[in-house]
């Protein structure tokens, strides 16, 4: 199974990616995870990526494309994959298409998670992340036992720059301008499946599996 997950930031792509990757026994390939690893290790790529992420803007295509090409060439992706966070625009979609043609790895489906902007801002601006173990909590939906302290490692919980309300609003603007057109791109190719991203995690996963199987 070769899948792409699309949807605005905060739609739950990361959560659903983990569930679907486990269901289909394929690797979950997240550009966000790759960026965060580089940022945490203060690599040159990480520093470049951070400057864009902090402003709610997208990391340049050239950097992202290079990482994705390399990742899809690794042995565990030979029998399938789930891409989360890529492609983010039609130029990246064109580049991905070239990569997949070269590797004879055609896509099976593109799953879109739909959700209102107001709900996204509520979800993301309330998120708090542990500085030590990166575990996420939420001031409304998933509170830590002690305010500001991680339940797992007692690390400090903080609000990431890209979770601040004004940055989230900017990220949604960027998504609408640059990423939303890929929904039309994949719809024209007959690959798009659209489901609601509001509800229980397991219910959304089952909805996704049913939609993909059609």
Image (tube, rainbow, N blue to C red):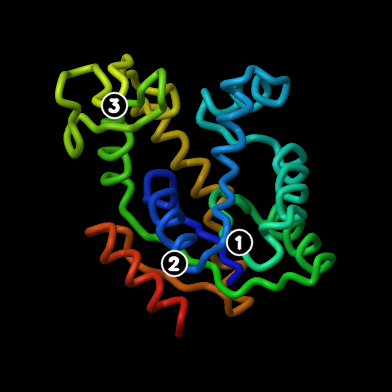
> Which circle marks residue 152 in the picture?
3
Who is closer to the viewer here, 146 or 171?
Answer: 146
Residue 37 rendering spot, x and y as whole percentages: 59, 29
The quarter of the picture where the N terminus appears is bottom right
Where disc 3 sits, the SS reads loop
Q: Position of residue 192 (x, y in %)?
A: 52, 72
**Number of other residues with Cα within 10 Å of mark 2, as a class: few under 14, some 14 to 19, many 20 or more:** few
| Residue 88 drawn at (x, y percent) | 60, 50
Dots 3 and 2: beta carbons under 8 Å? no
For label 2, the SS is helix
In screen coordinates, is 21 left or right of 79? left
The tag earlier along the polypeptide, 1 or 2, is: 2
| Front one among 24 and 35 | 24
User: Quick check: marks 1 and 2 in contact, CB under 8 Å?
Assistant: no
**Which mark is nearer the camera, 1 or 2?**
2
Image quadrant where residue 164 sits: top left
Assign the C terminus to one quadrant of the image.
bottom left
Q: Which of 58 and 12 is in front in this view?
A: 12
Pointer 2 residue: 23
Give the residue pinned by disc 1.
81
Residue shown at 60% from the left, 75% from the top: 108
Left or right, 66 with reference to 213: right
Marks 1 and 2 sit apart, C-alpha to C-alpha, by: 12 Å
Disc 3 crowd rating (10 Å Cα; few below 14, some 14-19, many 20+) is: few
In the rendered structure, the answer to whether residue 171 lies left or right of residue 149 reads right
> Do the residues under discs 1 and 3 have CB atoms within 8 angstroms?
no
Q: Which residue is drawn at 29% across and 26% down?
A: 152
């Amino acid at each position: 199974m070769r899948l792409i997950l699309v949807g605005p930031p905060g739609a739950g792509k990361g959560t659903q990616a983990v569930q679907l990757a486990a269901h289909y026994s394929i690797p979950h390939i997240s550009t966000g995870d790759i960026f965060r690893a580089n940022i945490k290790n203060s690599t040159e790529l990480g520093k470049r990526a951070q400057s864009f992420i902090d402003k709610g803007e997208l990391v340049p295509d050239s950097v992202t494309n290079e990482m994705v090409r390399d990742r899809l060439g690794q042995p565990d992706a030979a029998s399938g994959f789930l891409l989360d966070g890529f492609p983010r625009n039609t130029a990246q979609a064109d580049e991905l298409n070239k990569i997949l043609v070269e590797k004879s790895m055609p896509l099976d489906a593109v799953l879109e998670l739909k959700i209102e902007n107001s709900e996204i801002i509520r979800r993301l601006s309330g998120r708090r992340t542990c500085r030590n173990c990166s575990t996420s909590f939420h001031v409304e939906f998933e509170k830590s036992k002690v305010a500001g302290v991680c339940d797992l490692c007692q690390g400090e919980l903080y609000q990431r720059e890209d979770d601040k309300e004004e940055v989230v609003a900017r990220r949604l603007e960027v998504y609408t301008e640059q990423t939303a057109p890929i929904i039309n791109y994949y719809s024209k190719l007959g690959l798009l499946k659209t489901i609601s991203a509001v509800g229980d995690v397991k219910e959304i996963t089952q909805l996704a599996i049913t939609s993909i199987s059609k």
